[in-house]
Amino acid sequence: MTSASGVMTRSLTLIDELVLTLLNEESGYFRQVAGWNLNCAVVGAALAELSLLSRIDTDMESLILLDGTATGDPALDPVLYTIAAEKSRRSAHYWIERLAPEAESIIDLTLARLCDLKILQHHDGDFWSLAGSAWRMGAHTGSEVGTAVEFVKTRISRAIFNNEIPDPRDVIIICLIDTCDVLRFIFELDEESEQRVEDICRMDLIGRAIAEAVGHNIAGPLFRRSALSKQIPVVKLRKLLRSKNVRAGNLPAVFAELHAEYGPVFEIRPPIADNMVCLVGPETNHWVHRHGRTHLRARDYLEDFEKVYGGVGLLPALDGADHFRYRKSIQPAYSRSRLAEQLDDFYAHARNEMSTWHVGERLPAVGMCRKLVNSVMSPLLVSIDSQDIVDDMHKFKDRALKTHIGRTLPKFMLKTPGMRRRAKLVGEVVDRVLRVHTPAQRAGCPRDLVDDLLTMHANDRQFLPESNLRFVLSAPLIASMYVGDQLSFIAHAMVSRPEFHERIRAEADALFADGDPDGEALTGPGTDVTRRFIMEVMRMYPIVPLSLRNVANACEVEGYELPEGVRVFIVTTATHYMEDLFPDPYKFDIDRYKAPRKEHLGSGYAPYGLGTHTCLGSRLTELYLTTNLLMMAHYFKLEIAPKNYKFRISPFPSMSPSRRLKFRISEKRRELPV
């Protein structure tokens, strides 16, 4: 519908309104509500909406079906169909408890609807915020009252504090929010207003049924930890030692094998390291993505690593509202659109690095790809050239990870003369960056990551203190290690598969035929094969196959109890080698990502991680990988060296091809433009 002012408006359902009032914009999360309480409130909202649509009615004893005609709302119609299929007449209380397990799907559909209506915006990492258009949402009345959230809160406020006679819709939404116990986070409630809330909640039968369902909580044992929880199985070490995937270094495939025998939760007890509780499979991926923020914490295992760089509260170690605030502050720097605006510089820097490649030369695959990525990433993100020191920076990061994250090396290995020298280079990077980021020198320059970070530092020096600058200003050099390692996997896959090499080369030659392609061309149908090829390599060889977390709040996953304090290894990419998700998983097949298969949809495909710590620069990385690979194919012909090289993976501290892999520059297909 359209308001008098011409603004497009849409009616919000009670489920929409409930979800919006639960949004905490500061954290990007929804306020944490006990599972059963939330489930009851969501189902109650659905029943109440059906009542307002004259599909059902309620009395003191039962819920009555009036009209089984579909509403057209995908969140409401399954509820209506279930009620219509029941031959016996049941109470509202019964239906709330019966349908509570379906609440999660109702919430998912509601979030999708609110995004479609441009009321909510979904961010990488499963964060949410109000979209810009939400500020002009005149829901129901057509009047412009601010955001949709403010519209709901204004109605609630009038009913509670102004003693106005509440509309039936307002009575229900107050009952729902009171059930979720979040009114106290929205308003300052004194004794009188609390009594008013109680009086309002008694005005509606469905609201009372919700309260009864929560109060009785007959399903409570399902949500409480129990002495009957399953015992976590322990992996037999000989099982690991016999695995060909262990010998090849293919960690995702190793854990897929273990999942097939031991299930979604199991423990590995290495002889010289701490025990590893592992979460593996689509079920645990889904749990981590939806519930990890409530129960898991990243800070604990990263504390010692932070100290290596002299910082505390770095982005990878943050959780909750601070993590969301940090991501929002630097999101523009990691956006694909910002890189697309600087593609001319991208091509120039990449060609400058490629000009050092000579026909007949053998280059270490990992080092070659890391330097190619850094040749672009360093100047575009931090506005400096760091090619002379990037190798040492990568070696220092590699040693720090093995020492403090993988714990495969003793701590004194970071104190050797070579490591002490490399540690000083971190300060050198900071000095270089700060020297070129003065106001006069930055005037007229495209904004980069450092500009965003220094603005954040100036605005809140406790949130981003000076002590953290050593890490954050050198982060792009560290990132080039990961992206470079992924590119080396991709380049090896291309060179070792001539049929794909030809198809990628054909796309590259077509794109560059009339000059350098723009961002739209690089992400359009002209790079379809290249993009799907990269996706398949990232499925088979993801550089970060797992993540570590500590259990902050005891929980139960797939029937296994995880006590507070235990460290868990979340192997998100083990699903990449599971037959039911990716048929014939050891086969290289880029058609997995075409309709109708689209095997990558869902939480089974996770090369960038899952949940709140999903890689912030995933879309940027995709463009880096695509562009670099196309340029390599367009300008050079590569061969694997030595010719009898047997592909192996170096699994720690992150996955990369073994250092024995080299690329021989066998031909320069065309001259590099100056």
Image (cartoon, rainbow, N blue to C red):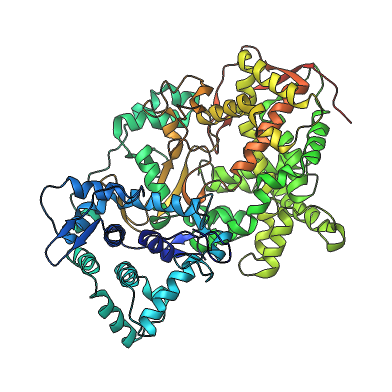
Q: Image quadrant of residue 466?
A: bottom right
Q: Residue furthest bottom?
A: 192
When the figure is inspected, residue 391 is found, relative to residue 473, above or below; the finding is above
Farthest residue, direction front? 4
Whether residue 189 is visible to the viewer of this picture, yes or no, is yes
Q: Nearer the viewer, residue 604 or 395?
A: 604
248 sits left or right of 234 in the view: right
Q: Is residue 273 visible?
A: no
Which quadrant of the view contains residue 523? top right
- Residue sitting at x 23%, y 75%: 202
* 652 sits to left or right of 244: right
Question: Does 102 sit above or below residue 177?
Answer: above
Lateral position of residue 142 relative to residue 78, left or right:
right
The residue nearer to you, when weighing 545 against 173, is 173
| x, y percent for residue 82 | 22, 47
Give the residue at x 70% y 26%: 364
Q: Residue at x 36, y 62 (%)?
A: 14
Residue 543 image point, x, y percent: 55, 35
